[in-house]
């Protein structure tokens, strides 16, 4: 029995030495000589410092943005030239589709007809997307100043093309119902697409649901993509 106690004691001593060596190794290699508690405190302090620095940077950004707006406002108020240039820039941004606009116009909704259970096939306006292009052309020829399809603003580079069973507009897939907003003379726009043998009559004869409403105020969103010119340059 006494010998057993001796062996147990030796085993405990060896295990204690091994654990102390391992703790020393971890402390020197991963904790830079600190205890785990000290390292935790250090990390928490660094985190608090980073968060405080982030708050200061956000406050600085807000301050600079406010200062910029004050400078722009002051410059516009003091200089008629700057104000005129600002107005001209806003006008060009509106024409190019880079800003949200509102005004009188028409709201056109086009949807698929109810599925014919007997035929077992479903008609999809996406497959007749060229009719959507025809409708947009009619609106443009009638003087539409801004057009959107399902909140996608139409600009000079906008594509309307079939993508599977949907339609891509500004590379964004959209599905029926198609809601087309157009700003312009509501009466003229309505008359252009609702004329006899016109595009609305054509769509309805094909079985599609079409609703056209004249509205006093309609809002067309801004183009939310990017426009790049890789080949075209300005001519002086």
Image (spheres, rainbow, N blue to C red):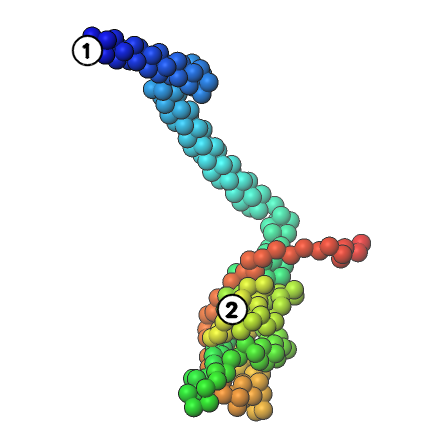
Looking at the rendered structure, the secondary structure element under dot 2 is strand
Q: Let me know if residue 78 appears in the view.
A: no
Tell me what residue is drawn at x 62 percent, y 68 percent: 159
Identify the residue position indicated by label 2 in the image.
174
Looking at the rendered structure, the secondary structure element under dot 1 is loop
Tell me what residue is drawn at x 46 percent, y 35 percent: 58
In the rendered image, the vertical position of residue 224 relative to residue 52, given as above or below = below
Indicate the position of residue 28 as horizontal and vertical percent values.
44, 15
Task: Point out the tag, 1 or 2, that comes first from the N-terminus.
Answer: 1
Give the position of the N terminus as an image quadrant.
top left
Indicate the position of residue 226 as horizontal and vertical percent values.
61, 55
Indicate the position of residue 148 as horizontal and vertical percent values.
54, 68
**Disc number placed over residue 1 in the picture, else none:** 1
Q: Residues within 10 Å of mark 2 (few under 14, many from 20)?
A: many
In the rendered image, the vertical position of residue 234 relative to residue 39, given as above or below = below
In the rendered image, the vertical position of residue 124 relative to residue 79, given as above or below = below
Viewer-closest of 139 and 22: 22
């Amino acid at each position: 029995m006494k010998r057993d106690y001796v062996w147990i004691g030796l085993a405990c001593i060896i295990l204690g030495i091994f654990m102390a060596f391992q703790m020393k190794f971890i402390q020197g290699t991963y904790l830079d000589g600190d205890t785990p508690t000290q390292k935790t405190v250090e990390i928490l302090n660094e985190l608090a410092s980073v968060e405080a620095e982030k708050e200061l940077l956000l406050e600085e950004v807000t301050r600079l943005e406010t200062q910029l707006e004050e400078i722009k406002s002051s410059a516009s108020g003091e200089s008629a030239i700057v104000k005129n240039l600002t107005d001209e820039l806003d006008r060009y941004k509106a024409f190019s589709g880079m800003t949200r606009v509102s005004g009188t116009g028409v709201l056109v909704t086009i949807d698929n007809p109810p599925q014919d259970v007997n035929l077992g096939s479903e008609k999809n306006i996406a497959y007749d997307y060229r009719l959507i292009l025809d409708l947009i052309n009619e609106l443009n020829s009638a003087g539409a100043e801004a057009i959107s399809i399902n909140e996608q603003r139409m600009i000079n580079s906008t594509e309307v093309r079939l993508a599977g069973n949907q339609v891509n507009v500004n590379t964004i897939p959209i599905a029926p119902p198609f809601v087309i907003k157009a700003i312009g003379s509501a009466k003229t726009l309505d008359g252009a697409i609702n004329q006899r043998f016109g595009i609305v009559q054509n769509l309805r004869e094909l079985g599609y649901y079409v609703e056209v409403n004249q509205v006093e105020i309609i809002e067309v969103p801004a183009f939310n993509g990017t426009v790049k010119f890789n080949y075209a340059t300005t001519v002086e």
